[in-house]
Image (spheres, helix red, strand yellow):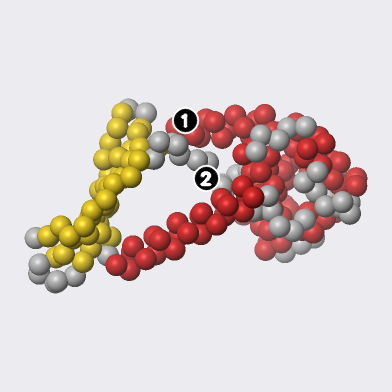
C-alpha cells in the first residue's frame, strides 16, 4: 500500500525540438579534404543525419579518409550538430550558412559543404517534420511522492499524458530514488545541449 505525500502537475503546450549535438570545433571537418570526390562528401553529409551509424558506413569512412572509428563518429556527430542548427534556426541561404564557419576555415571545403547543405536542407527539414508528426507528444504530466508501507521507502509515481495518432493515452511509471536521480541528471544534460544550440 502507498500513502500519497506530495504531488504536482504541469502542462506541456509548446513542446520543442530535441537536439542531440552542439557545434564547438570545426577541425574534425578537415578530414573531408581526404575525400576522393564531391559525391563522397555528399554521402557523408547524408549519413550524418542518421540516428544510428552502421558499421559498414563507418568502415567506408575510416578507409576512405584514413581515420580511426572514433574520428569517423566525431565527424558525423559534428556534421549533425551543425545541420541541427540550420534546421532549428531555419537557416537556408549560402551566406548565412557560411557565416557559421570560422573565418580561417578552409575556403574550398567550406564552400563545398555550404552547397551540399543547401541542396540537402529541404530533405532534412521534411524528415524532421514527418518524424514530429509520427512521434507522440507530451501534453501534460503529474507526479506524486508515495511511501511504501512495507519497506518504508519513498517512490515517485509519474503520470504522462501522451497525444498519439490514435488519440490521447496515459503512461504511468514508478521511480525509485536512484532512478529519479538518474532521470534528473539526464534531463539536465538535455537542457544544457538545447541551450548551447539556442545560444549560438
Q: Position of residue 13 (x, y in %)?
A: 40, 36
In the image, residue 5 sits, relative to residue 163, either above or below, namely below
Q: Earlier in the sequence, mark 2 or mark 1?
A: 2
Please tell me the numbered disc located at residue 18.
2
> In which quadrant of the rendered image does the N terminus lie?
bottom left
> Which residue sits at x=84%, y=41%?
112
| Secondary structure found at label 2 | loop
> Which residue sits at x=26%, y=40%?
170
The one nearer the camera, 184 or 75, is: 184
**Residue that numbered label 1 is attached to:** 133
The image quadrant that residue 55 belongs to is bottom right
Q: CA distance from mark 2 to mark 1?
A: 14 Å
> Which residue sits at x=33%, y=45%?
10
The one nearer the camera, 187 or 43, is: 187
Residue 48 in the figure: left or right of residue 41:
left
Q: Position of residue 26 (x, y in %)?
A: 77, 56
| Residue 106 seen in the figure | yes
From the image, state whether disc 2 or disc 1 is nearer to you.
2
Amino acid at each position: 500500500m502507498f500513502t500519497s505525500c506530495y504531488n504536482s502537475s504541469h502542462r506541456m503546450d509548446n513542446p520543442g525540438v530535441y537536439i542531440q549535438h552542439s557545434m564547438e570545433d570545426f577541425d574534425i571537418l578537415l578530414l573531408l579534404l581526404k575525400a576522393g570526390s564531391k559525391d563522397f562528401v555528399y554521402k557523408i553529409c547524408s549519413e550524418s543525419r542518421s540516428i544510428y551509424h552502421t558499421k559498414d558506413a563507418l568502415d567506408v569512412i575510416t578507409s576512405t579518409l584514413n581515420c580511426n572509428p572514433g574520428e569517423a563518429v566525431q565527424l558525423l556527430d559534428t556534421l549533425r550538430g551543425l545541420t541541427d542548427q540550420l534546421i532549428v534556426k531555419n537557416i537556408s541561404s549560402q551566406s548565412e550558412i557560411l557565416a557559421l564557419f570560422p573565418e580561417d576555415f578552409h575556403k574550398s571545403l567550406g564552400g563545398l559543404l555550404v552547397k551540399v547543405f543547401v541542396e540537402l536542407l529541404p530533405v532534412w527539414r521534411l524528415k524532421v517534420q514527418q518524424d514530429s508528426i509520427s512521434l507522440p507528444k507530451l501534453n501534460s504530466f503529474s507526479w506524486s511522492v508515495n511511501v511504501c508501507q512495507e519497506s518504508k521507502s519513498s517512490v515517485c509515481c509519474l503520470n504522462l499524458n501522451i497525444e498519439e495518432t490514435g488519440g490521447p493515452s496515459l503512461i504511468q511509471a514508478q521511480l525509485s530514488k536512484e532512478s529519479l536521480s538518474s532521470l534528473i541528471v539526464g534531463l539536465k544534460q538535455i537542457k544544457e545541449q538545447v541551450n548551447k544550440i539556442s545560444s549560438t
